[in-house]
Image: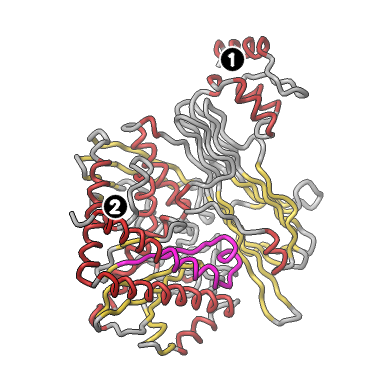
Amino acid sequence: MRDAVLLEVIKNAMATIAEEIGIVAVRSAYSTAVKESADASAAVCDCEGQVIAQSLGAPLMHLSSLRWSPRELMKDFPPHTMKDGDVFLFNDQFRGGIHSNDIMVFKPVFSAGQPRFLTSALIHVADLGGLSAGGLPATATEYFHEGLMLPPVKLYDGGRLNEDLVRIISANSRTPEKVMGDIRSMVGGCNVGARRLVELIDKYGLEQLHGLVRELLDYTERLTRAEIAKIPPGTYRGSYVIEDDGVVPDKTYTVRVAVTVNGSDCHFDFTGTDRQARGAINAAFSQALSGVVYALRCFLDPAIPMNEGCFRPLTFTMPPGTMVNPTPPAACNARMATVQAVIDAIFQALSQAVPDRALAASGNVHVYTMNGADRSAGRIWSYMDPVIGSLGARSVKDGLDGMPISLFGGADRPSVEAYEIEYPVRFNRFRLWTDSGGAGKWRGGLGLHREVTALEDAEVTVRAADRCVIPPPGIMGGKPAKGGGWVINLGTDRQIDLPSKKTNQPLHAGDTLSMFISGGGGFGDPMDRAPELVAADVAAGAVSIEAAARDYGVIVNPVSFEVDTAATHKLRAQRRRNP
């Protein structure tokens, strides 16, 4: 091994460069959801497409895209054809992308006249056309409904801007200034990252730097293999049912996986997974792989660096035309239904091998886009507001209230004040949702209740990825969480209960949209939960007095919040005799 200290220096230098790319992109972005919640990803890779480092806040679902898409880019533009000053972009979900609105930008980094590395960034841009503003049509049935699809193309050719491409993108967007602002922010981030890499090359020399990078990836592979080898060998099976695709009524979809651990190798076989859906819940293969990598890493040492070495021990069987590897023209904007199902199916499988790391199902992402006409300015306004469900209960502790599963990177949430400044809306409520976490020895994380009023006539597209009709289930005797949903004008004579997926629902000025985000499932028998924990939940407003008795068999004083020990013992004894 080379100098271990120098290897650590290079590892952190590469990670810092990736982080700086992401920071520049976020601070320069135009879209509210990006600049307020840091919804951007960045990575550094070599000219073989191997990921060397990612930004710390990058969702793993983006990392797999930033791993596969450079390889697709180089099929169309081999490194030897690239010029210094080139910048490429594309969003093709069937070539490593995610869905239309997630645009990826790549810049080759030159040294001694040759491309040596690629810097990359990915942002969910404001709007690229499609059936609904914001590019998330809940009832899309093909990718043409989701917005402009771009193959790998040059945005800059040797430093010269491709004005024709800019005009094409702008003409296909309802909010062209925001889209081009977001793209420029990614270019700026990649430019900064390229400068930092050149400085690193100048300091350490190209040959030594490449050698250290190879050793870093090999080191990560060794760590990953050592952790996989700790899992008992065998084949473990799991599955998860998705409630609907928003298009075909009363049809469910199942993701099935067989995980085979053989020494330090791990194979994931999705044979038996249902055929791709007509609706938009399909996950492009890079997204399904993101779910695989995330789920596996939950059973490994979290200190292992996230780079190409993590992928080397893994192999996959992902039948084409299925939910986890759809073929064109599949719609994919609601992909998180399938990605989360992949995660929970693998959790179910590997929990058989490593039961002390078991996790109940978590809530999924709920997102809406709202848009209207700014008549004074003669343009359309549009924004996206995503809220991610809470973590399921774990084998040793409760789920996290209001905190998302870590696939999504950081838990930053957009500031409601920022939305109110930029758009004609008012947020009335954002709170934890009482009794929404699944009951169990360990309680599932609470879901969320968010409420926004349109101050002008508008349209809203709502897209709960999954887990409303069939809420996140509990495990090992734990109970399911409460399923979420959407309601307009809750509790009034104008109440409208929306389906979980609805495109372009009209809103009148003064209408209020309530979004309920599913909680996490419970772990273990609720009758085994310590009564004092139930009382603490009641005092905190997480569990109601009624639910404490109904779900946990615990009687809590409504004034002092103390446990009535005798009454609790009696009630639990009755429940155990008559479950």
Which residue type does callout 1 highlight? Arg
Which secondary structure dominates the residues rendered in magenta?
helix
Q: Please provide percent x and percent y for residue 575.
A: 59, 15
Q: Name the residue under label 1.
A: 575
Q: Considering the numbered disc 1 on the image, is that residue within a helix, a strand or a loop?
A: helix
Q: Considering the numbered disc 2 on the image, is that residue within a helix, a strand or a loop?
A: helix
Q: Please provide percent x and percent y for residue 387.
A: 59, 53
Magenta span of residues: 18-45
Disc 1 packing (10 Å; few <14; some 14–19; many ≥20): some
Specify whether 488 is left or right of 141. Answer: right
In this view, 341 is above or below 553: below
Q: Please provide percent x and percent y for residue 468.
A: 57, 45
Quadrant in the rendering for residue 527: top right
In this view, 526 is above or below 235: above
Q: Mark 2 points at which residue?
A: 310
Specify whether 147 is left or right of 91. Answer: right
Q: Is residue 25 magenta?
A: yes
Res. 140 visible in picture: yes
Res. 315 visible in picture: no
Measure the C-alpha gap from mark 2 to mark 1: 48 Å
Specify whether 147 is left or right of 94. Answer: right
Q: Is residue 223 magenta?
A: no
Q: Residue at x 20, y 70 (%)?
A: 207
Residue with the most extreme right position: 493
The quadrant of the image that shows the C terminus is top right
Quadrant in the rendering for residue 73: bottom left
In this view, 10 is above or below 451: below
